[in-house]
Image (spheres, rainbow, N blue to C red):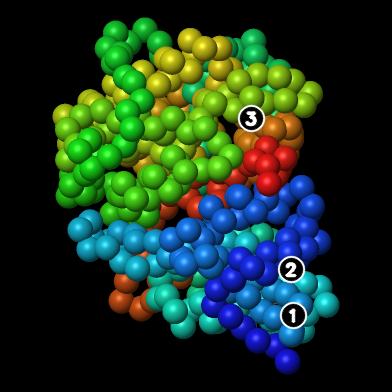
Amino acid sequence: MIRIDSYFPMRKWEQMRAFLSECYRPDHAICSKKFFEWQFQVDSNNGNARLMCAWNDDRLLGILGYLPLLVNWGEIAKPYESAWLLYWMVRKEALRGLGLLLIRKIHEMYPLLLTVNASPMGQPILTSLGYTFFKSVPRYISVFDKQQCSNMLLDESMGNDLDAYVFKSARSESLNISETKLNERNYRPDWHFYNALSFGTIRSLEYLTWRYIDHPGFKYHVVIEGDPERPAVCVYRIEKAFGDYEAMVGRIVDSYFPCDVEGRKRGMDLVFTVLQHLKSIGCAFADLFCSNEIYGQLFIDLGGGMEPTDRQIFPVRLTPIQRVIRYQNFGFFAPKGLPLPDLKNLYVTKSDIDGDSPVSRLLIGR
Ligand SMILES: CC(C)(COP(=O)(O)OP(=O)(O)OC[C@H]1O[C@@H](n2cnc3c(N)ncnc32)[C@H](O)[C@@H]1OP(=O)(O)O)[C@@H](O)C(=O)NCCC(=O)NCCS
């Protein structure tokens, strides 16, 4: 008899670990208990993980993770309850349509659903249910060291293209930024200043703390500049690429600022300072996946550029370097009555949900 539960109790971890290691791979990051508990917000959910689970007696047959998060959806100060979907998987032995059943259950709980990196199997099913998909969230790159970069190209012929992406380090105004511990005194944005964030997850203090500060695997650097009500924000981490070449790469995963002249100037100074720092410590390049045109344009104004949508310059997976094309897709289901945004008006980055994840549980432990 199949039973569907809307959460997963951690006391059954051994069944979950076995399911994940069989259906994904034994060294997948999600097989680390520590990472799993963080990803599915066990601490803030009475010891239960936010996963819809299909059981046959005590055998786990399928899962669908969901993260309830407040988003803006068309109007800036009107938070909307949504769930981001992740880790949708059923065992091969399961009845046909079990995955679909899990999705239907989640639709009974949340009207607005969002996801990134849907698989070639999942995407057509979701599309048939009314989801809208954007094939690739734009990726902006900023080249610091052409010599190192030429060893990291997806295809050697792209070496000539690098000139178009070189960081303009001649700009004079760099800030004296330091990482401050985020708290209510220094970070309480008034979202009315941030029109470009009118479609996307609300980057509240609580969200940033969970997503970056408490992350069990990555060391993120969160830098803010400006008044607590209207800060410019840039979050990045430094990745040590390895495999057939070794280099450091700056991965910028969030970058936003108030959408007025003063806010843009602060954003520009902040991102410039971060890029200059990444260059000075020897990074080969930096990248930013960001759907929003306004925030992407800033990268372009600083000398970088948007990778062409039909071919990539640099690999996306760097630990180890995988020379394959990999786009980040984004999909959503909005009920009737809610607006359908263009990609350029959304604010979706690589860090949304599980877009920026460690490749192996060995990097996390436990
Ligand atoms: C994606 C997954 C969870 C779906 O599980 P499932 O519901 O058991 O999948 P099914 O193949 O039985 O398809 C269910 C229904 O979806 C619809 N569907 C399936 N493939 C479809 C396609 N290519 N286009 C449109 N509809 C499709 C059909 O209605 C189908 O039911 P039917 O075959 O009885 O008509 C499962 O295939 C899986 O675990 N895949 C591996 C992991 C993965 O890719 N996860 C998705 C991440 S986004």
Q: Which residue is mark 1?
A: 58
Secondary structure of the residue carrying numbered label 2: helix
Local crowd size for mark 2, using a 10 Å CA cut-off: few (<14), some (14–19), many (≥20): few
Tell me the SS state at disc 1: loop
Rendering coords of residue 344 (x, y %) = 38, 48
231 lies left or right of 249: left
- The image quadrant of residue 174 is top left
Q: Quadrant of residue 199?
A: bottom left
Q: Position of residue 160 (x, y in %)?
A: 62, 17
Residue type at mark 3 is: Phe
Query: Residue 194, how many percent across, how many down?
Result: 23, 45
Residue 176 visible: yes
- Snapshot quadrant of residue 65: bottom right
Q: Please name the residue that numbered disc 2 is placed on.
A: 15
Q: CA distance from mark 1 to mark 3?
A: 45 Å
Residue 121 or 211: which is nearer the viewer? 211
Q: Which one is earlier in the sequence, the residue at label 1 or at label 3? A: 1
Instruction: Please give the residue where the numbered disc 3 appears in the rendered image.
Output: 314
Cα–Cα gap, marks 1 and 2 = 8 Å
Q: Label 1 sits on what residue type?
A: Asp
Q: Residue at x 31, y 24 (%)?
A: 270
Task: Say above or below: 237 vs 2.
Answer: above
How many numbered marks does the figure carry?
Answer: 3
- Labels 1 and 2 touching (C-beta < 8 A): yes
